[in-house]
Image (tube, helix red, strand yellow):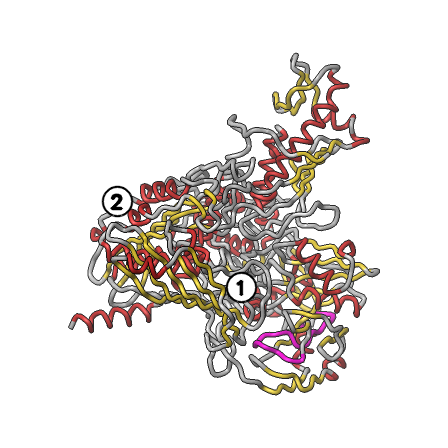
Amino acid sequence: MHVTLSINGADRTLDLEPRRTLLDVVRDNLGLTGAKKACDMGACGACTVMVDGRAMYACLLLAVDCTGREIVTIEGLGSQGEADELQRAFLEADAFQCGFCTPGQIMSLRALLDRVPQPSDEQIMQALSGNLCRCGAYRHILRAARMAAGREHAGPVPAQ
Amino acid sequence: MKVRSTRKPSTAPGVIGRRVSRLEGIEKVTGRALYSADVRLKGQLYARVLRSALPHARIRRITTARAEALPGVRVVLSCENAPDIPWYEESRLFDSTVRFAGEEVVAVAADTDDIAQDALRLIDVEYEALPFSCGFDGQVEEPSVQTRGDVERGARAAEVIIDQSYSTPTALHNCMEPHGCTADWNDGALTLYESTQGVFAVRSEVAGKLGLPEQQVRVIAHHVGGGFGSKQTAWKHAVIAALLSRRAGRPVQLMLDREAENLATGNRNATRQQVRLGARRDGTLAFIEARILIDAGAYLAGGEASEVSGIYHTLYRCPNVRTEQRAVRTNAGPAIAFRAPGYVEGAFALESAMDELARALGVDAVDLRLRNYASDDQDKQKPYSSPDSLRRCYAAVTEAFGWKTHRRRDAEKGSKRRGIGFAAHVWPGGAGFPPATACVRLDASGLAHVITGTQDIGTGTRTGLAQIAAEALGFPLERIVFHLGETADAPYAPTSAGSATQATLGPAVQAAAADARRGLLAAAEPLLGEAAGDVLVRDGALLVASKSGKTVPVQDVCEAASAQAIEGRGERGPNPKDRAVRTFGAQCVELEVDIETGDIEIVRVLASHDCGRLVNPMLVDSQVIGGVTQGIGFALSEARRVDARSGTVLNANLEEYKLPTIADVPPIVNAQPDLPDYVANDTGAKGIGEPPIIPTAPAIANALFDAAGVRLRDLPLTRRRLIEALAAQQGDGD
């Protein structure tokens, strides 16, 4: 069936099987491979995108249910390939290692920061509790979020 | 020209030692980094694999006609039509007998992933079920025994003896990016975009399986979504994808789903360890003995061995040590190295037993370890290349933690109890696996291309090695372009395993950069009209300078020399013969436990690990924090569950296999001593990838005893186990 999706500010009309997930559509039909398929059952958060400003698992959404909604993927952040301040904070805090979960982590935090520009640690952790990172970069991700919220700066963590 | 670096370490402030962000970071935070599943080739098909539902069975019949008739299905491959390729000891790529639930039975390539999945549902496999074993019920193999001294004599001399059994579960790597590849077979040559820790290892294994010359297989892994050991060999999917591509005449992408990832691409083997150790009253160890069983699964998959016995022989000075390690063969997925294989499992038992010994003797846990300090490899009878570094780690971590001054009762309220725990480790990795070669080529624009055949699995390989190259060239980091993750046109590099990459490639890169620098200086002479002496940055310009002070821009030199590009090569020489190169570390944990609910909350972790010279302290912090985070999962929540009646895995997913989340991880601080080890190699740096996971679980178990007064000897330390132990303790008290 023909559906029109708003992805990163542009309307895209596609011929889709109703069973196709939003994740498969952005990755395979549109070639936006930033969102990752790591569990395909809503358990890890690597596929997180923003839908109408909320962080959602793209692997649990049917694309046909997303017509008329504003979808933003990691490719829609920043401008002209430049990183936004949250992405820069990830670089400075070394908030990733292998980078596979990173687009999802950033999209979850982007949704939080858009709603709550200066979140508490508790709000940050809640926003990220559905995003797994097997490399174990969580403490640096928390740091990056604090930096993006203007609460912390780059540099070594004191021993105590 | 091949040379070894003679350049002495620079003490001037340079690029080494700086907290530089990852070179590839911008690609990762913008989603532009391409992993195996992100490859999109023209005409690419998608493949799926039907896997055995039974743990042990003979395949009677496979009926694929309905699948083959489905529009969009291009190739169906099984034991009935696949080439006969040996795999796993006596088995085959597609065997007519399956030996674990999850083993490959039929592969389908189709126009879309949806069609491939539909096709799998149309395949009928008739099995004849065979008896199976799981847990530790399987066939026990001959032991591997290692002995030093005489443990019976040691036991007679011991005044205090600890005799306990410990167990560790099967843990699943769960790299966020599952295993998988995109295979493109074209004109008799194969290009494989593979998520791997070893592009050269995969090239060699896949070429061997397919009967191709290695030069006709090209393996590419520019970005790898986690490794942790499970991606150090070529698994079946790579060869299956290649065969599908050959038959279809089109590229084929075969990514494993999470379930397959957790069934068929390795795991950390479960262990049972019966440990006896004893000491004299003064704390001097008299003997250590361990009887170890490991659950190896259905097949031996190769790669690094899980040597659980190793840590018993090397962590402490002890004249009498005996270990006996036996593999048990069960009908479960094969085990493979998982971050510090063997030592993680061994450390849990040994470091728990040492804590029990310290309490039995009434001495401090750290003092007991200092009393039994080892500064040499006692089996190999060689001094360590950094004999004092473990002592320095003990000092750094206990001071940063406040071990000696800690007052644990301060924060206790109601049913909450607090405790602290300590554990140490040694690790034979981190020394490097020679040989390796690196090449540094200056292009006409004055950029330095560092060309290696290694891969960056998320450890920061590009960045750490680029810092070495920049320093040896005298270039700013921005002038370095780092190449890795390709077998074509790249010099050989070993697999990223054994915490070896920085220590293996670093000296080769340093030597190649020094060689290229010599070439640059020589090429500058005709332009300067006299001998060149240095490379320097002045007013933002990168210059070659003569001794008398004349300068010429590096770019001009490179442009003039462009016809015969300036190039340097460097080789990684052997490790020292008369020293044992090891890495060491120690951790302190504080936790809080609720003795009514069994809730365990880690309050903080302090770590200190020796990795020689700190090339990039920020990346080292990330490795340490990440390792501790995985260690917390291993200690508290991770365990593969196998149903004993069906022989199937119950939690081969990320819903029920519990990885730590951001909410489970406390502040983790790396109190890192900078301990350059120039005996190990001439960069002074050693590896840090694996060690930080080793001592975390025993430090947590020791802190739990300190807090709650019960000793849990089986991982993970679940709420149920804790509640049962607390109830038993209460029962004993009544």
Q: Which mark is residue B404?
A: 2
User: In the orientation shown, which residue stands out farthest toward the left?
Assistant: B734
Q: Which mark is residue A57?
A: 1
Report the chain holding disc 1.
Answer: A
Determine the residue positioned at 77% across, 32% down: B565
Give the left or right position of residue B210, taking residue B20 as reference: right
Q: Nearer the viewer, residue B24 or A81?
A: B24
Q: Is residue B29 in sight in this rendering?
A: yes
Amino acid type, mark 1: Tyr
Is A78 covered by the magenta stretch?
Answer: no
Determine the residue positioned at 60% across, 49% down: B456
Amino acid type, mark 2: Lys
In the image, the segment drawn in magenta is: B96-114
- Residue A118: image location, x then y, percent: 41, 47
Question: Judging from the image, what secondary structure is the residue with disc 2 in?
Answer: loop
Q: For mark 1, does the 10 Å Cα neighbourhood hold few (<14), some (14 to 19), or many (20 or more) residues?
A: many
Q: For mark 2, does the 10 Å Cα neighbourhood hold few (<14), some (14 to 19), or many (20 or more) residues?
A: few
Determine the residue positioned at 71% across, 74% down: B108
Q: What is the quadrant of residue B733 in the picture?
A: bottom left
Q: Which mark is residue B130?
A: none
Quadrant showing the C terminus of chain B: bottom left
On screen, residue B678 above or below B232: above
Give the left or right position of residue B273, taking residue B471 as reference: left
Question: Judging from the image, what secondary structure is the residue with disc 1 in?
Answer: strand
- Residue B35: image location, x then y, percent: 64, 56
Report the chain holding disc 2.
Answer: B
- Residue B523: image location, x then y, percent: 75, 24
Q: Are marks 1 and 2 on the same chain?
A: no
Is B103 covered by the magenta stretch?
Answer: yes
- Residue B367: image location, x then y, percent: 29, 47
Q: CA distance from mark 1 to mark 2?
A: 47 Å
